[in-house]
Amino acid sequence: MIPSVRVRFAPAPTGLLHIGNGRTALFNYLFARKEKGTFILRIEDTDAERSTDASIEAILQDLGWLGIFWEEGPDGGGQNGPYRQSQRLSLYRDDAEKLLGKGKVYKCFCSPERLESLRKDQLSRGMMPKYDGRCRSLSEGEISKMESEGLRPVLRFRVDKGMVVFEDLIHGRMNFDSDGIGDFIIVRSDGMAAYNFACVIDDHSMHISHVIRGDDHLSNTPRQILVYRALGWQPPVFAHHPLILGPDRSPLSKRHGATAVSQYREEGFLPEALLNYLVLLGWASPSGEEILSMEEIVEAFSLSGLSRNAPIHSRKKLEWINSQYIRKTDKDRLTQYLLPYLEKGGIAVNQLDEKYLTQICGLLKENLFILSQVEEYLGIFFDEKFFLEEEAKAVLAVPQNREALQTVLIVLEVLTEMEGDSGPSLLAQLEEKTGRKGKPLYGLLRAGITGKMKGPELVKILPLLGKERMVKRLKMALELS
Ligand code: GLU
């Protein structure tokens, strides 16, 4: 028995997985989980020139990293395969033959040059470009003559007059006058099925119940419905969600910054955070809660809750969500996440004291919006990365500040080794000896001991650095400035 809900994500493997596509995959995945249905991954690689195996690999990897898993797909599993369109060509051929036999499609021999000049002419006359039907009623004789001359036709779908109406789960009732559609190609002259055809054959034979995709495909849907009708099949339910826009309200693209899922991974976004952010683009939890686990999202998710308005990408919001996830991550796991960034920052992590490393990572939790920012803080914890930022230099240039730091140095030099919780008592002692309290003292200490004016709480940094490091730093700072 086929479960009632079967959805699919059907990327074309022509590049990296865009966050917009990741979001489409997510909506399908959530809907399948919510409805206890099946989520299918289908690779739409009929464009042989632009499709690559490397892109398929990358898409599979990025989906897996995001935590989106499929029950049926190209890497095994599923009764309805193969799940790569390039391996389904005979299926398309059979159905194309059927339609040809019924007269629903016809052979068209128009050359690309003729089609291009037709298009230009229509545009120049303010008309919507569409095929003019020249080959619609060729005789058998004309067809065999052209074929014997070696001309290879495309197959065009015969679009008759009428309306195509369907209920979209997000946009409501959609009406298309077929007059605006024009006879479209279902099989190209090289024998390859076109998207609008292959998609219908696959969705039907894979028993897809709901097609959830971006609304850039809205204009394809009436064409696909016509193909369903011609084959005597019931179309699935459609839900077209608006695409993500950049802050200038144009479709999100590279000029707005990172667009690929893998770029966000490399920068140090956590998969749960990126997923959480993507679902909030166009959907809100009924409780208004913004930080939600996958289980909570599945529980609250509904297709009818998706907005008709296009969401606007906000890097700031994504970073904020990521920071919330970083704060929730326990320090051992966070350390694992941060290792590659520490290495990239030039820290020989395998020569480090594990405890020191974990403590640093735990401390930085509150400061990081993305993992790669850890590099900004290396100077605080690692002597070889210590340097004075301009602001710190300015603090150290003031004679009274230098004097106060000399006093600090004296206190530190006679200090016995520090315990983890001895920050407050050290600060109290330094307040007393320098005669400075609160912020003015903390600013000084930050400048002299960490080289930066910002960072995790000083009261925690100092005991972690320990006496020797602090003394060494302070001496270096006083010499360097
Ligand atoms: N291959 C199409 C795309 O990547 C899929 C469209 C669909 O979901 O039908 O946009």
Image (tube, helix red, strand yellow):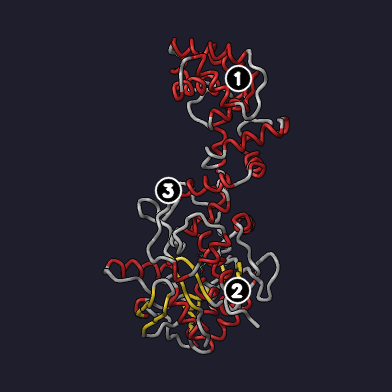
Nearer the camera: disc 3 or disc 2: 2
Can residue 390 be seen from the camera position used here?
no
Mark 2 residue CB less than 8 A from any atom of ligand 1: no
Q: Residue at x 41, y 65 (%)?
A: 307
Residue plotted at (51% across, 84% down): 234
Q: Residues within 10 Å of mark 1 (few under 14, many from 20)?
A: many
Asked whether mark 1 and ligand 1 are closer than 8 Å, the reply comes as no
Residue 73: image tag: none
| Mark 3 nearby-residue class (10 Å; few <14, some 14–19, many ≥20) | some
Q: Secondary structure at mark 3?
A: helix
**Residue 218: x, y in percent?**
42, 71
Identified at 58% across, 11% down, the residue is: 410
Q: Secondary structure at mark 1?
A: helix
Residue denoted by label 1: 470
Give the residue number, with chain letter if any, for mark 3: 256
Where does label 2 land, which residue? 37
Q: Amino acid at mark 3?
A: His
Q: Nearer the viewer, residue 323 or 245?
A: 323
Circle nearer the N terminus (1, 2): 2
Measure the C-alpha gap from mark 3 to mark 2.
Answer: 36 Å
Of pointers 3 and 2, the one earlier in the residue sequence:
2
Q: Is residue 15 above or below residue 197?
A: above
Residue 96 position in % (x across, y down): 55, 81
From the image, state whether disc 1 or disc 2 is nearer to you.
1
Name the residue nearer the viewer: 254 or 470.
470
